[in-house]
Amino acid sequence: MTSRASAMTRYQRALRRAAKVSIGATAGALACVVVAVGGVDGAAVFGPRIPLAQAIVATAALALVVIAVIRRAQFAPPTARAQRVSMWLAAAEDLADLELALALVAGMHVIIATTGGQRSPAYPALYGLVAFSATVLARPGAIATVGAALFLEAALLVRTGISDGTILVFTVHALFIAGAAAAHAVLLRGLTARYRRRRARRLDDELVALRDAAKDYRLIAAALSPDSRAVRSRDEEERLLAIGGVGMIGDATSWVLATIKRSLGATTVALLWVDDASDRLRLKDIASEADDITEQPKLAHTGVLGAVLRDRTPLLVGATKPNQIPYYDSARAGVALIAVPILEGVHLRGILAADRETPFAEADRDLMTDAGGQVLRVVQSEQVFRAVERAKYEHERFFTATAMLGRALTPEQVMETAFDACAAIVEYDAAAIALYDKDRARHRVAAVRLGPAGEGLVDPKQLAELEFKDNAGLASMVVKNRHYLPAAGELRELSAPIYTRKVKLDDDAKSLLVLPLLSADEAIGTLTLVARAEKRFNKDIREMLAVIANQVAVSLQNGFLYKKMETMATTDGLTGLTNHRSFQQRFEDLLQRAQRHGHKVALLLCDVDFFKKVNDGYGHPVGDEVLRRVAKVLQEVPRKIDIPCRYGGEEFAVLLDNVDVAQAKAVAERIRIEISKVVVETEKGPLSVTESIGVAAFPDDGHDRAVLIERADLALYHAKHTGRNRVVTWAEAQAAKSKKAS
């Protein structure tokens, strides 16, 4: 008996569905039949009198057109789930197109019938309607439009009377109807269909590629080293993990729900999740034969499932009352319901519910409980997987960052690499490194980097070489306390500035972290990171960045030591000028570049006159001071691109880039004059010195480094032996030698 009642209920439900989706198409077909049999023929708008009955029929047909247009515009196709359980719902969209097509054709023939029949001037509008349907509507609607138009045209021919003239008019109209449909179907519709297919294929390909990428990532990410995988941003990694995780959970829960449905013979099995913020239920997944499942993910009410939310115990209901099952749109009643809580410890995560026509047993409850536990284990395993992958990603970036710092040598390289290393761990929009001089108690911003979205967060001009003393700013406090600030890595209403009150962050800055650079437990500076996003520097990120900051400090100390050693290796300790070995290398580099580009290079060899007498008469400390004063002149007089060097003893050399002999001699004269103005105060009174200079130039005086040095030395020798305190070029020395020989 129950089985017969259930079959009758399904039959009635199917009838209701059929009536609901086909009533519009039926009305359109009926309107076409009424027009075909001449129901509006007497309502000629140009006639002396319009019969009331025909006028009513014509008005009703036109009203049907308006209703059909409105219904089609507001039509929402049934869900995929509903279409799977009912053939009528699957055909709902095609039937909606049929309704619109038949109503429009009937309405157009009403206009034709009331404005002259076969001779009506409204026929172009009919052709346009056919073209519109062939272009826009799906195939059933387009075919119905053409078929109905030809059918009503044939009916009009019969009502008008068959003769040679009417047949000719009918033929012309039929050809125009078919031509309008064919032209748009072949041209515009074909083109549109091609673009639709291409777009659909591209979209499908992208979705498949995205799903494959997520699954591939989940399957092979653990098997490949970081260098073997494609470089992805943190957001991209999170997105792929989320897509893969949701896909895996969805596949697993769908299988569980389908299995439970088959095992219990249930009409519907639903997985509902608890919204933590509001304790409301969300419909996560469902397996059902019903077509009245709600389309809203967040359920409007909890119904009888509220007891499970409250008591957190399984629920068995023999026969539900109307509106008690929240995932049905209809007021379904009289069905049996079983619902079990999905508990994670003491926390309620969701509810697994099933309903059917016959009551459930205790064994069914146990089966549902096991199924709920399986769903929870699937979710938990995905959570563990994501946590492991996230930690793996962060640690890979951490090790990458430390390796990057290990390759940096100079302080400048270390600071630039520090920004790269931090970017490998977390995305930021602006960063700065400030160094602290403990002896002077002053801070100096040594490096700044703005990301693509960092423009406007802070003014880099304000930070460039900014120097400030210890104050109440965050950087000073971080150095004093040797601990990062702010405590949670978030920018709040802070009265203390980062560096000075003149340096302000934009209001869009939401995350801030100032880290101490600690070396041997002593702060040598700070590393500041700023981001527009909120909660960018969480606890794990802060801990890794703190380790990176410590390594940056050690690398900076090593960089300063490296720079000091490099300076010692290339610089003369007394004068601060380039030493002899570096001079030889740089001279060779200049000559090679000049040969490639056709430039000129000049060499000045300088010697302090009577320097031995200075050492003998005033002592070596005074001699050293004289050399330092001469070196200062050699640094100040030439251009910044020129290279002054200490050649040896009291001899100096100056390399002049891209100057000829005449220009080089002019520079040498200025040097000679400035040195003659130098006065060194000694115990024996003021001491002045002079300098002799020899000049040789590439390519006029030679092409080889050794040759040019030799010829500049010969010119210097000539200056020494012809009065000292002179500038002599190699060409002048050669000319004087030739003149003396003659």
Image (cartoon, rainbow, N blue to C red):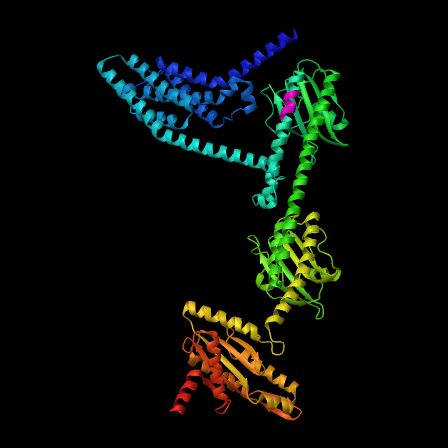
Q: Percent x, y for residue 210?
A: 54, 36
Along the line of sight, the residue nearer the viewer: 697 or 10: 697
Q: Percent x, y for residue 675?
A: 54, 86
Q: How many marks?
A: 0
Q: Percent x, y for residue 711?
A: 46, 81
Identify the residue shown where x is 38% and y is 14%: 34
| Majority SS type along the magenta span | helix
Q: In the image, is residue 581 above or below residue 399?
A: below
Instruction: Look at the image and say whether residue 190 sits in the magenta stretch.
Output: no
Can the viewer see residue 565 in this picture? yes
| Magenta span | 254-259
Q: Quadrant of the N terminus?
A: top right
Can the viewer see residue 726 in this picture? no
Identify the residue shown where x is 59% and y is 56%: 457
Q: Is residue 480 left or right of residue 141?
A: right
Image quarter of residue 446: bottom right
Image quarter of residue 327: top right
Along the line of sight, the residue nearer the viewer: 277 or 570: 570
Q: Is residue 605 left or right of residue 404?
A: left
Identify the residue shown where x is 60% and y is 81%: 628
Q: Percent x, y for residue 524?
A: 70, 63
State the residue lying farthest toward the left: 164
Identify the residue shown where x is 22% and y is 14%: 164
Q: Quadrant of the C terminus?
A: bottom left
State the residue lying farthest toward the front: 741
